[in-house]
Amino acid sequence: MAKATRREFLQIAGVGGVVFASGLLKGCVGAGPTKTTANGADDFYFVQLSDTHWGYKGPANPEAVVELPRAVEMVNALPSPPDFVVFTGDLTHTTDDDQERRRRMTQFRERLAPLRVRTVRLMAGEHDASLDRGKAYEEMFGPLHYSFDHKGVHFVVIDNVSDPKGMVGDAQIDWLSNDLKAVAKDAPLVVFTHRPLFDLKADWDWTTADGSRVIDVLHPYQHVTVFYGHIHQEHHHNTDHIAHHAARSLVFPLPVPGSQPNRTPIPWDPGHPGRGLGFRDIDTEPREPKYRLREVALGQEA
Amino acid sequence: MRLILALSLAAALLAGAAAVRAGEVAASSAAERVVQVTARRFSYNPDVIELELGVPAVIELTSLDRAHGFAVADLGLRIDVEPGKSARVRVVPDKVGTFPFHCDVFCGSGHEEMAGRIVVVAARQKPALIAPQ
C-alpha cells in the first residue's frame, strides 16, 4: 500500500483545518502541494506544540508522562516532516527546587531526542522561567527572546514570562522595534509568545501586562500572526488585522474563558484519556501570506 | 428629646461615578474601614472581601512568604504585595456585584488557584439608637 500523502493522513486523522490569510479568517480550502513561489519563498509547514508541563503530577492528567512521547510519535508519523517544530512555552511544570527544574528540563530534552525534525524552536512559559527569571531556561536552552527568518517569513519569539508579573518590559520592546526595522511592512511576520498579548481574560491572568505596547509595535505591519499557548485550548482572536491563535496543551485542558468561576483544569475523564489535548500544524504560504491551521487531537475526543 | 445616632452614608455616595474608584493610599482616614488581608502561597485570607456600596474602605495586604500580586481586573486595580511591607488600596464601591481578584505575580505550582473575590453589597441600614427620654 502506498504511503499516505500528508493530506490523506490528515483526513485519516480526522483533524479540522481552517485557513487564515493575512491574519483574517477566510474559510476552508484544500491543502495544495508544496511549491516554490516566484520570489523564492517556498510554501512550508511547521508544527506548534505547547504546554507540556513535563514533571506535572496531579489528577488533571494521571497519564501526563505519556503525552509528550505520544506527540513526538504523531509528529514523526506525519507523511513529510515539518520544516520545524515550535514549543510555545511551559515545557516543564514549575518547581521551587532549582535542581529539579534543571532535571525536568533535561528530561524534556531527552524526550525530544526521537523527534525526526531538523529544527526545534523552544521558548519559555511562566512555569519554566518565572521563579528564577529564566536563569535555568537560558542555561539549558538558550535565549528567552530571539528572531529568525525562514523561507520569506520573519519569526519573532517574545518572552512575556521571565518577569513574574507577565511583562515584556521596555528593553525587549526596544529590541523588538529594532528587530523589525529590517522587515518590510508588507512582509509576513509571525510572532510566538506564551501568554496572550491581548486581554483574553485578565482575571484569570490570561493576558500580558504590557501586551498592548507589543501590539502597538506590531500594528504597522500588514501581515502579522501570533501563535501562543498558556490557555491550554484552541482559541482564535483578532486585534484589528493581527490574528492570535492559541494552541492546545499536551498535559490538561483548561476551561473556556469565563465558563466557570475559576481556571481550574477540566477534570480528567478516564473514559476519554487525553481528551482536549493536541497540537497543530500550520501550512504556510508566504506569498499570500496564508496560514492553514490543522488541529490534531492527541487523545480520544468522541 | 430623642437622640438619634446613626452613620450617615449619604456623604459617601458619589453621584456620577462610573465604577469602583480605587487607588493606593498612604494612610486611611478615620472614616474608612480597613480590611486586613494576608497573602501566602497559594491563597488569600480572607478570600472573600465584603464591601458596602458607597462606603470607602482600605484593603491592606501583607505577604507572609514571598512576592505576590493583588489584581482586580474588573476594577482596573492592582498592587504588588511584598513581604515586610503593607500594600494598601483604597476603594469606594459604587456598584453592587462580585469582582474576582487574583495573584498576578507568578508564585509557583498552585499560583493559578490563588484568587478570591470582592463582593459589594448594598449599604446596610444602620439601626437607630434611640435614647430614652
Image (cartoon, helix red, strand yellow):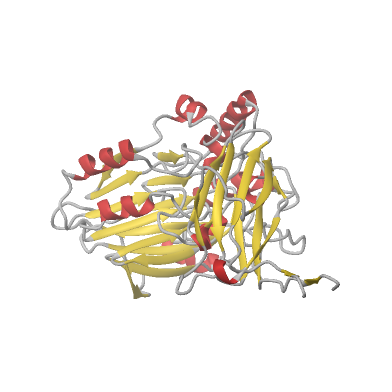
What residue do we see at 53% from left, 53% from top?
A205
What residue do we see at 46% from left, 71% from top?
B18
Quarter of the image where the C terminus of chain A is located: bottom right
> Which of the pair B117/A154 is nearer the observer?
B117
Q: Residue A77: x, y in percent?
A: 51, 52
Residue B42, image quadrant: top right
In the image, residue B8 sits, relative to residue A103, either above or below, namely below
What residue do we see at 58% from left, 59% from top?
B56
Horizontal side of A162 relative to A223 (left or right) equals right
Q: Residue A281: x, y in percent?
A: 43, 57
> Which of the pair B9/B94 is nearer the observer?
B9
Q: What is the number of callouts on the image?
A: 0
Horizontal side of A72 relative to A262 (left or right) equals left
> Which of the pair A54/A13 is nearer the observer?
A54
Q: Residue A206: x, y in percent?
A: 51, 55
Residue B133, image quadrant: bottom right
In the image, residue A35 sits, relative to residue B13, either above or below, namely above
> Which of the pair B54/A164 is nearer the observer?
B54
Asked whether residue A34 is in view, the answer is no
